[in-house]
Amino acid sequence: DELDAPEVARMGDEIWLFYSDAAGIELARSSDGETFTQELSPVLDGSAAPAWEGGAAPRAPGFVALGPGEYRLFYEANGRIGEAVSNDGLSWQRLGDAPVLEPDAVAAAFDGASVGDPEPWVAIGAEGRRVTRVYYTGRAADGSSAIGLAARYAGQGGLQRAPAPAFTSPRVPFAPSIVSYRDF
């Protein structure tokens, strides 16, 4: 199997590694960060998927903890971004029957062909409200790509995209990653 799109999270005393393979999104856990034990089945696969996923296995997990027992997993399927929820990080349920982010309706847009590789980030906005930001790869019809940003204040539902890419380059960037810096 081809493995890709690793996403690491600290869950209590363990390190959890979410990743994609042909079956969907898998999880391996470790107590020391060196030896990982894979769960017996994917945490999110193509079964019970809504029609928008088009039979594609979910891939490119983006994990975020909103609070104790409140976890979200953003994922890519069929050129769109979906979301699943869990209270333990092991058992996931898809949210809604529609993706949280679709390609831009304007075909010439930087993300007019597909969106994927979600990387969520939760922060507190200037008004004191929680904002969920999702950086993503946007692909245009000409094959170019750029890093986009979409966000929402609500606990769930669709994401509102920024009007322009957050990062673009002739090197065709993809698969964004966020690094936390204290007070930044």
Image (cartoon, rainbow, N blue to C red):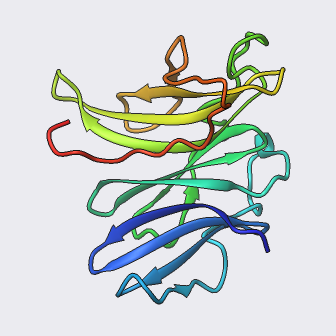
Q: Is residue 158 left or right of residue 172?
A: left
Q: Quadrant of residue 27?
A: bottom right
The residue under the point 44% across, 43% down is 120
Measured as percent of width and height from the top left, residue 28 is found at 53, 79
* Horizontal side, residue 74 vs residue 31: left or right: right
Task: Determine which quarter of the picture holds residue 82.
Answer: top right
Query: From the viewer's perspective, is residue 109 above or below residue 66?
Result: above
Q: Residue at x 63, y 39 (%)?
A: 174
Given residues 15 and 81, the one toward you in this image is 15
Looking at the rendered image, the quarter that the C terminus falls into is: top left
Outermost residue on the front side: it is 171
Task: Name the residue rendered at 36%, 87% in the picture.
Answer: 31
Q: Quadrant of residue 137?
A: top right
Is residue 30 or residue 25 the one in the foreground? Answer: 30
Q: Position of residue 161 (x, y in %)?
A: 52, 20
* Residue 124 rendering spot, x and y as whole percentages: 22, 34
Q: In the image, is 127 to the left or to the right of 48?
A: left
**Is residue 96 visible to the viewer in this orientation of the structure?**
no
Where does the image place residue 162, in percent across and percent down from the top left?
A: 49, 17
Quick check: 12 above or below 181?
below
- Give whichever of 39, 93 is nearer the camera: 39
Residue pictured at 74% horizontal, 47% vertical: 50
The front one of 32 and 69 is: 32
- In the picture, the quarter occupied by the N terminus is bottom right
